[in-house]
Image: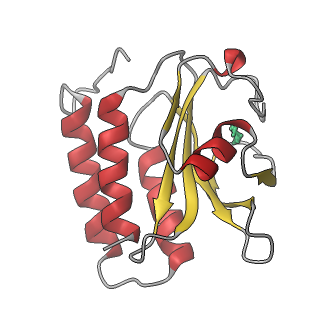
Amino acid sequence: MAYVARDDRPADKATRYAEVEAEILAVLDGEPNLGARMATVSSMLADAFPVFFWTGFYVVDLTKSDELVVGPYQGTLGCLRIAFGRGVCGTAASTRQTQIVEDVHAFPGHIACDSRSASEIVVPVLDASGALIAVFDIDATEKAAFDAVDAGALERLLGKVFAA
Ligand code: SME
């Protein structure tokens, strides 16, 4: 992505992620509630990069373990439920691998919640025992907004927030 820094922010996105990670960990220090942790991550990341259009969690449904249900998010209305294996989120859940999609309209089975979404990244979220508890989805208004820098930074952040 052509990361555009604001005047008050660092020139590269790895540094920006490191800043936001430190801010999120400081806010969450001592807060055990999972909903509060997810809401805080969604909110603070939504505000961190201008091209982020939708940031949020789909959590593993405790009553249907092969289905995701929407959790805390920032953005326009997201679909409520996604079966494992469906779309980008369901693929991340079933493979437990981070998915980077440069053009969502070219992704087979992509679930279109909002036509402004052009590219996305979805990262599996594991707890301290290694169990999948959710996936974290970021959609961007530009094509090819995400790369290995985003994947590495988000995997590290989510590991610190949910698996530590
Ligand atoms: N794009 C996702 C659906 C969720 S929304 O983008 C909020 C997918 O295909 O999994």
In the picture provided, is 71 more to the left or to the right than 136? right
Q: Is residue 59 above or below residue 101?
A: below
- 73 or 153, which lies in front? 153
The number of callouts visible is 0
State which quarter of the image contains the C terminus.
bottom left
Q: Residue at x 58, y 22 (%)?
A: 141
Q: Position of residue 159 (x, y in %)?
A: 34, 62
Q: Position of residue 85 (x, y in %)?
A: 72, 45
Q: Is residue 82 above or below residue 67?
A: above
Q: Residue at x 53, y 19 (%)?
A: 102
Which of the colour schemes (rainbow, by chain, secondary structure, one colour) is used? Answer: secondary structure
- 7 or 140, which lies in front? 140
Q: Residue at x 30, y 41 (%)?
A: 152
Q: Position of residue 50 (x, y in %)?
A: 44, 30
Q: Residue at x 52, y 51 (%)?
A: 96
- 13 or 155, which lies in front? 155
Q: Position of residue 55 (x, y in %)?
A: 56, 46
State which quarter of the image contains the N terminus.
top left
Quarter for ligand 1?
top right
Residue 3 location, quadrant = top left
In the picture provided, is 88 more to the left or to the right than 16? right
In the picture provided, is 130 more to the left or to the right than 9? right
